Amino acid sequence: MADAFTYGGQTILSHPIFVETILPFLLIFTIVFAILQKSKVLGDGKRQLDAITALAIALIVISFAQAVGIILQMIPFLAVSLVVLLVLFILLGMFWKDSIPKGYEYFLASVITVAVAVAIMYFTGAWEWLLDILYGRTGNAELISNTIFIVIIVAAVIVVVWKGKSESKS
């Protein structure tokens, strides 16, 4: 009787139908529904319309195997990242009871943004493409290097000008 609830020695939660269909569907549906509810894009108090839209988007996403594959690859990263963020926020809460100092807010936001961007690039295969370009395995290495250098210079100029404006207001 116990064999009815297992699949090849694994639990029912590791069954391909559950892992490749139900979990990605629930994840996409929940995220889209929450975004629609919070942003009120379709109107205030339109829960049914938000639910139908989230249902349609989730069904469309799970109908494409490549999208489901990317989601399945990112779920372990998401789980580990959430645990790391939870521990980080607990540690920050021990030191700063009221609020995080302004400089640390931006630093944490930038670290989280970079980590998410690198994870997305890694799981979608864009990371290998970027490394190929940066290390000159394609013909555009000089163009890409110069572009990255110019972006860094522009970012530095923006930071300097922004700090100059904030200091002049004080």
Image (cartoon, grey):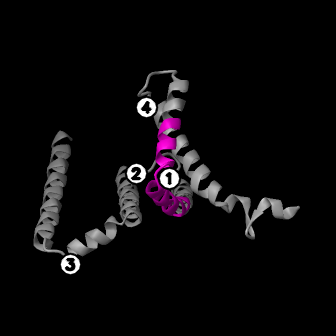
In the displayed structure, does residue 91 sit left or right of residue 170?
right
- Which range is magenta? 55-79
| Quadrant occupied by the C terminus | top left
What secondary structure is marked by label 3?
loop
Separation of residues labelled 3 and 4 (CA atoms) = 43 Å
In the displayed structure, does residue 136 sit left or right of residue 7?
left
Separation of residues labelled 4 and 1 (CA atoms) = 30 Å
Q: Is residue 155 magenta?
A: no
- First in sequence, mark 3 or 4: give its number: 4
Please name whichever residue, 86 or 133, is drawn nearer the observer in this view of the structure. 133
The three-letter code of the residue at mark 1 reads Trp
Vertical comparison of 36 with 133: above or below = above
Q: Nearer the viewer, mark 3 or mark 4?
A: 3
Q: Which mark is residue 96?
A: 1
Q: State if disc 4 and disc 2 touch (CB < 8 Å).
A: no
- First in sequence, mark 4 or 1: give its number: 4
What secondary structure is marked by label 4?
helix
Q: Is residue 57 magenta?
A: yes
Is there any visible trace of residue 31 in the rendered image? no
| Within-10-Å neighbours for mark 2: few <14, some 14–19, many 20+ | few
What secondary structure is marked by label 1?
loop
Q: Which mark is residue 137?
A: 3
Q: Nearer the viewer, mark 3 or mark 2?
A: 3
Please name whichever residue, 133 or 115, is drawn nearer the observer in this view of the structure. 133
Mark 2 highlights which residue?
Answer: 101
The three-letter code of the residue at mark 3 reads Arg
Q: Which mark is residue 39?
A: 4
| Within-10-Å neighbours for mark 1: few <14, some 14–19, many 20+ | few
| Within-10-Å neighbours for mark 4: few <14, some 14–19, many 20+ | few
The three-letter code of the residue at mark 2 reads Pro
Separation of residues labelled 3 and 2 (CA atoms) = 43 Å
| Within-10-Å neighbours for mark 3: few <14, some 14–19, many 20+ | few
